[in-house]
Image (cartoon, rainbow, N blue to C red):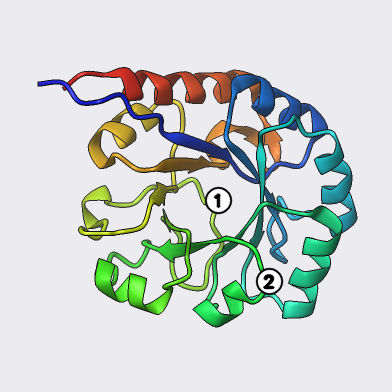
């Protein structure tokens, strides 16, 4: 039995270099992520991200990633960088996430081996455009390179979801086939070093996602 072809969205996160942004656009990714989390090796200053954004190809969304940041700082990033979406990885509530006037993704920590039900997640974050399930533990950063048990994903979500955590060219085909996410998010899995992307891994990652999209069951 075959299924309708579905195009899985692709986000490359932790971007820090103009040449990597150019390749991402050429490979046809849907979004790129800029990290504004203290302590992250991929963190950018707002002015750096603003300059990088100026060289981005059209039709590629910019996602700004935060974790329990002061509202004033988020507003400043929004003013300078003009992101299309915000992504929150901490304990932010729905009112906070919605207060910046932009669509937002809410990251859900899966590294603790448990997750709320779909109903509970949606009740807690009714304004979320999508949920992003990542392998970090509660209070920890993403981008660890570790995966989690995909069978722990909550059933019955009425919002799109993105899969993250430990994805790379060697396992994203299986990840897409098994979980059928709206999108996949990758950072360390396409890097030579934190924040320094590898062109061959970037290309292979996109190819494997597209191969999974066209695979017949």
- In this picture, is 207 found above or below 162? above
Q: Position of residue 146 (x, y in %)?
A: 43, 48
Q: Secondary structure at mark 1?
A: loop
The residue carrying mark 1 is 143
Residue 124 appears in the figure: yes
Task: Name the residue located 45 percent from the left edge and 40 percent from the top edge.
Answer: 184
Q: Is residue 206 left or right of residue 178?
A: right
- In this picture, is 130 found above or below 123? above
Q: How many marks?
A: 2
Q: Earlier in the sequence, mark 2 or mark 1?
A: 2
Q: Quadrant of residue 20?
A: top right
Q: Closest to the observer: 45 or 52? A: 52
Separation of residues labelled 2 and 1 (CA atoms): 25 Å
Q: Quadrant of residue 188?
A: top right
Q: Dot 1: few (<14), some (14–19), or many (≥20) neighbours within 10 Å?
A: many
Q: Quadrant of the C terminus?
A: top left
Q: Is residue 58 left or right of residue 68?
A: right
Q: Is residue 42 left or right of residue 107?
A: right
The residue carrying mark 2 is 100
Task: Name the residue located 39 percent from the left edge and 43 percent from the top edge.
Answer: 182
Q: Quadrant of residue 201?
A: top right
- In this picture, is 34 found above or below 179? below
Q: Quadrant of the N terminus?
A: top left
Q: Is residue 43 left or right of residue 131?
A: right
Task: Name the residue located 81 percent from the left edge and 32 percent from the top edge.
Answer: 18
Q: Position of residue 211 (x, y in %)?
A: 36, 18
- In this picture, is 65 found above or below 22? below
Task: Name the residue located 73 percent from the left edge and 31 percent from the top edge.
Answer: 58
């Amino acid at each position: 039995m075959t299924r309708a072809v579905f195009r899985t969205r692709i986000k490359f996160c932790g971007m820090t270099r103009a040449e990597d942004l150019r390749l991402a656009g050429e490979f046809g990714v849907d979004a790129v992520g800029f990290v504004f989390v203290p302590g992250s090796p991929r963190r950018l200053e707002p002015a750096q991200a603003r300059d990088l954004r100026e060289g981005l190809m059209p039709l590629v969304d910019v996602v700004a990633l935060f974790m329990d940041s002061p509202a004033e700082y988020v507003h400043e990033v929004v003013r300078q960088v003009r992101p299309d979406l915000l992504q929150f990885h901490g304990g932010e509530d729905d009112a906070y996430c919605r207060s910046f006037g932009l669509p937002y993704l809410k990251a859900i920590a899966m590294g603790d081996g448990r997750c709320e039900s779909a109903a509970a997640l949606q009740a807690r974050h009714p304004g979320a455009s999508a949920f992003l399930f990542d392998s970090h533990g509660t209070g920890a950063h993403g981008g660890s390179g570790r995966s989690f048990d995909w069978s722990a994903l909550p059933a019955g979500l009425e919002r799109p979801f993105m899969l993250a955590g430990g994805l790379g060219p060697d396992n994203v085909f299986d990840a897409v086939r098994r979980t059928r996410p709206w999108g996949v998010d990758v950072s360390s899995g396409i890097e030579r070093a934190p924040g320094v992307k590898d062109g061959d891994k970037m290309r292979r990652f996109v190819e494997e996602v597209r191969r999974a999209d066209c695979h017949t069951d």
